[in-house]
Image (spheres, grey):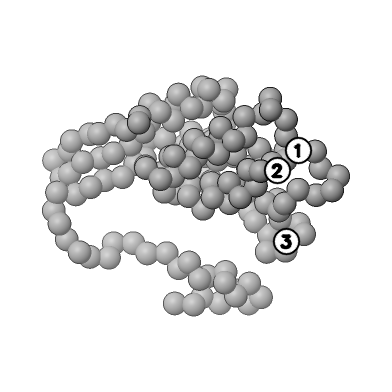
Amino acid sequence: MGLQLEYLKGGIFVHQEAYIMKVLKRFYMEKSHPLCTPIVVRSLDVNISPFKTKEKDEELLGSKVPHLSGIEVLMYLANYTQPNISFAANLLARYSSSPTRRHWNGVKHILHYLIRTMDMGLFYSKVSKSALTDYTNVGYLSNPHNGRSHT
């Protein structure tokens, strides 16, 4: 499965650094420039969003472009040790039946991001405590017209 376990004093750290490096080599991206975010800026206007469905004049990717293989790898990583790419990977997986060059560029963008975060993983503490450590305001852009938070 490519999982690496490190037993530390406070718990177990699970990551997939070796697997991610293997994936980057497979897609010839191991020496690429790392990026800070897993997704390009998305527009709320569906007509100009880079993650919209195929347009009439756009070509579908051929079998030479490993788009589905890239989506498969990203979904695997998102499920096991890289939850930070879940949103972007799921967004791109929507277009697996008719991928275009834009969608393949989105997959490559996430791979560039993984270069920067390949040493990250999940830490499972030995100490069992039920306390909120972090949270995200997922409703921030649910009202796109005035950007109000719904907390």
The reply to whether dot 2 and dot 1 touch (C-beta < 8 Å) is: yes
Q: Which residue is mark 1?
A: 60
Amino acid type assigned to the residue bearing label 2 in the image: Ser
Does the image show residue 125? yes
Work out whether mark 1 precedes mark 3 in sequence or the reverse, and give the earlier one: 3
The reply to whether dot 3 and dot 2 touch (C-beta < 8 Å) is: no
What residue is shown at x 35% (from left), y 31% (from top)? Answer: 1
- Marker disc for residue 46: 3
What residue is shown at x 62% (from left), y 34% (from top)? Answer: 67
Find residue 79 and report its image quarter.
Answer: top left
Q: Is residue 32 above or below residue 120?
A: above
Q: Which residue is mark 2?
A: 98
What is the secondary structure assignment of the residue under circle 2? loop
What is the secondary structure assignment of the residue under circle 1? loop
Amino acid type assigned to the residue bearing label 3 in the image: Val
Residue 24 rendering spot, x and y as whole percentages: 51, 27
Residue 59 rendering spot, x and y as whole percentages: 80, 38
* Mark nearer the viewer, 1 or 3: 1
Amino acid type assigned to the residue bearing label 1 in the image: Leu
- Marker disc for residue 94: none
